[in-house]
Amino acid sequence: GAVVSQHPSWVICKSGTSVKIECRSLDFQATTMFWYRQFPKQSLMLMATSNEGSKATYEQGVEKDKFLINHASLTLSTLTVTSAHPEDSSFYICSASDSRSRELFFGEGSRLTVL
Amino acid sequence: GQQLNQSPQSMFIQEGEDVSMNCTSSSIFNTWLWYKQDPGEGPVLLIALYKAGELTSNGRLTAQFGITRKDSFLNISASIPSDVGIYFCAGRTNAGKSTFGDGTTLTVKP
C-alpha cells in the first residue's frame, strides 16, 4: 500500500535551535499534505495544510513564522520548527493526499523533544 | 471550528467481549474515518465511510456513517489483546482536512 515516510522519527534539540522534519510520499504524488501536532494522551490537532507550489494554509492560533512549511515538490513537504522551546516538544504527524485517488495516508510521526 | 465528541474516553474489557464507541459532531462531514494509533506511531486507517447510512465491516470491525452525517460508531466484536490501543474517529471535508475526536483508549484483559 501507499507509504508516507517521516524523517527523523525522533529528535532532541537544545532550546533556541531550529529543527526540520520531512514528510515524503514514497509511491504517489501528493499535491496536498497536512501537518498535525499531538500532545501526550491527546488527539491530533491540525496545524496547517501544505500545498505544492504555494503557501501553506495555517489553522487559527498556529504561528506561521514559528512553524515554517515548504512543499517544494509533489512528494516532499517539510516542517521547520524555528527557535524551538520546550513547549514545542510534541509528536508531529504528517498526512499526504494522493493526487489521483484523493486517499489520505499518514506518516509514522516525528517526536520532538526540546531541552 | 468543528468539534468532535468521542466517547467513551477509555474502556477496560475482558478478552472476547464486544466494544462500541461513537463520535458526534456539531457539523456535517462528507467522510467519516476510524483510526487506531499505537504508542509512538502514526494513526492507521481502519475503516472509511463515504455515504450517509453506510455500514461497513473490516473483519471484526464494523462502522456506520450516521444518517444525519453528524455521527458515526465503531464496533469491535470478540476483542483480542492486540486490539489494545487508542481509537480515533475523524471527520473529513472535501478539501481533505480532517478533524479528530479525542480518542478512546482500549485496554483488553486476557
Image (spheres, rainbow, N blue to C red):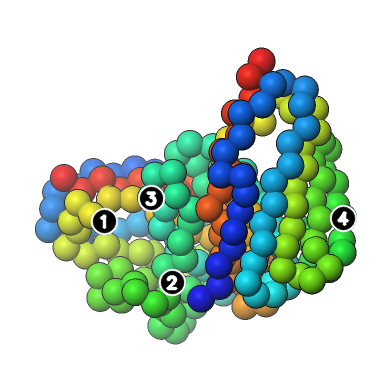
Dot 4 corresponds to which residue?
Answer: B55
Mark 4 neighbour density, 10 Å: few (under 14) some (14–19) many (20 or more): some
Residue at x 29% of width, y 74% of height: A63
For marks 1 and 3 on the same chain, the one whose residue lies earlier in the sequence: 3
Residue at x 73% of width, y 73% of height: B30
Q: Are marks 3 and 4 on the same chain?
A: no
The reply to whether discs 1 and 4 touch (Cβ–Cβ < 8 Å) is no
Of the two numbered discs 1 and 3 in the rendering, the one whose residue sits closer to the viewer: 3
Q: Position of residue B59 (x, y in %)?
A: 83, 38
Among the 4 quarters of the image, the one containing residue A88: bottom left
Dot 2 corresponds to which residue?
Answer: A48
- Which residue is most to the bottom? A54
Q: Are marks 3 and 2 on the same chain?
A: yes
Does residue B103 lie above or below B92 as drawn? above
Mark 3 neighbour density, 10 Å: few (under 14) some (14–19) many (20 or more): some
Chain for disc number 3: A
Dot 1 corresponds to which residue?
Answer: A88
Question: What kind of element bears circle 3?
Answer: loop
Q: CA distance from mark 2 to mark 1?
A: 15 Å
Mark 2 neighbour density, 10 Å: few (under 14) some (14–19) many (20 or more): many
Q: CA distance from mark 1 to mark 4?
A: 40 Å
